Amino acid sequence: MEEIAILGVGMHPWGKWGRNFVDYGTAAANEALEDAGVDWNDVGFVSGAVTVRCGYPGYVAGSTFARALGFNGAQVASSYAACASGATALSVARGQILSGAADVALVVGADTTPKGFLAPNEGDRPDDMDWLRFKLVGATNPVYFGLHARRRMDLYGATSEDFARVKAKNSRHSVHNPRARFTKEYDVSDVLNSPVVSDPLRLLDICATSDGGAAMVVSSLEYARAQGVSDPVRVAGISTVTPTFPDTVIDLPYIATDSAAGSTPASRGFKTSIGDRVYAEAGVGPEDVDVAEVYDLSSALELDWYEQLGFCAEGEAEKLLRDGATTIGGRLPVNPSGGLGAFGEAVPAQAIAQVCELAWQLRGHAEGRQVEGARIGITANQGLFGHGSSVLVRR
């Protein structure tokens, strides 16, 4: 697969601002355009990541942001893949660029979230699995996070202290990120003394919901060179694979797994397949990665990603963490941004924000949290209904 250039990135800080999501996305888009040195009227394609919590404008996010910036005749598209929406929007933009339909594209996502746990939209929908998991068993997102944490403890001997170490590590990183919502440094005892939310996970183990926006300007390599950018950060691979039947590990929003009684079990799990695809597309392996941004909806899930992205063998994530490999200054820093624990979840913006952080890292612009010498970075993300994503960037 041919690569595309990341010319500019931008983010509106995460928080609970109480404003329209369009404000956050427009601010991020303008910052990305300024960073790229690209005039808005030169953008030929706008790829919006959808939010389902903000009315009809959220469903047609591409057009909503194009209008807010001032309609310029660009083509638009809007993508929804739950938490992976931003990466899907980037994939659509890449297709437009590599097909020759556009030279330069804007990818943007933003969200305004309600207080408390994410919940289904109003109305009775007994054929909607996301509605059913709330109505039948009361399974909010942290219920699933707790199930995965307990699974990790049972399979690999993980402890609550290990989960707390993840949060403490990421909080040390977040102190240096002005775009993060939570920038207080915590130690392991702070996490262990916070209230239990979904056993064995505590309040500081679980990400909040937030408002925020992120954007990037991407282009063909030829366009980048014409703008005088000879060595841009490049998107080398994008993975948006689905699970393979039978999927025998419970995940959002399902309340049962596939049965493997009459089938040969899949040779690899869903999340492992996400990383495998992006590595194959980029022609690199986990041993080549210098920095990673992974979807730590809970601190325990970060440990799962270490193994699913091939950073270590199954059952060895805790050792990798305890040895300091995944902190800044270690062999392979993970979540130098502070991760979701520092940001909270602004669903359509989150996968884009992960790539923004990697772009800053590979440029050497991540002041205070810089991973020295980083040349290859990877993201990992999972959404509802069999969605997942990974983006690999390099310079």
Image (cartoon, rainbow, N blue to C red):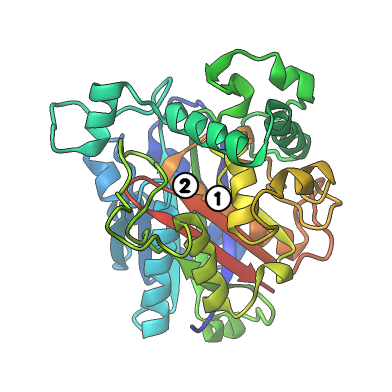
Residue nearest the viewer, comparing 373 with 325: 325
Residue at x-position 69% and y-position 38%? 178
Residue at x-position 80% and y-position 53%? 370
Q: Secondary structure at mark 1?
A: helix
Q: Residue 97, labelled with which disc?
A: none
Please state if 320 lies on the left or on the right of 387 as rendered: right
Please state if 66 lies on the left or on the right of 352 as rendered: left
- Which amino acid is tagged 2? Ala
Residue at x-position 71% and y-position 36%? 166
Q: Secondary structure at mark 2?
A: helix
Residue nearest the viewer, comparing 183 with 268: 268
Instruction: Tell whether label 2 touches label 1 (CB within 8 Å).
Output: yes
Residue 84, image x and y in percent? Answer: 42, 52
Residue 202, image x and y in percent? Answer: 60, 21
Please state if 82 lies on the left or on the right of 180 as rendered: left
Residue 279, image x and y in percent? Answer: 57, 72
Return the residue found at the far front: 261
Q: Which residue is mark 2?
A: 349
> Image quadrant for the C terminus?
bottom right
Picture mark count:
2
Label 1 to label 2, Cα distance in Å? 6 Å
Q: Which residue is mark 1?
A: 353
Residue nearest the viewer, comparing 36 with 236: 236
- Which amino acid is tagged 1? Ala
46 w.r.t. 250: above or below: below
Residue 37 visible? The answer is no
Residue 308, image x and y in percent? Answer: 58, 56
Residue 14 visible? The answer is yes
394 w.r.t. 27: above or below: below
Residue nearest the viewer, comparing 183 with 108: 183
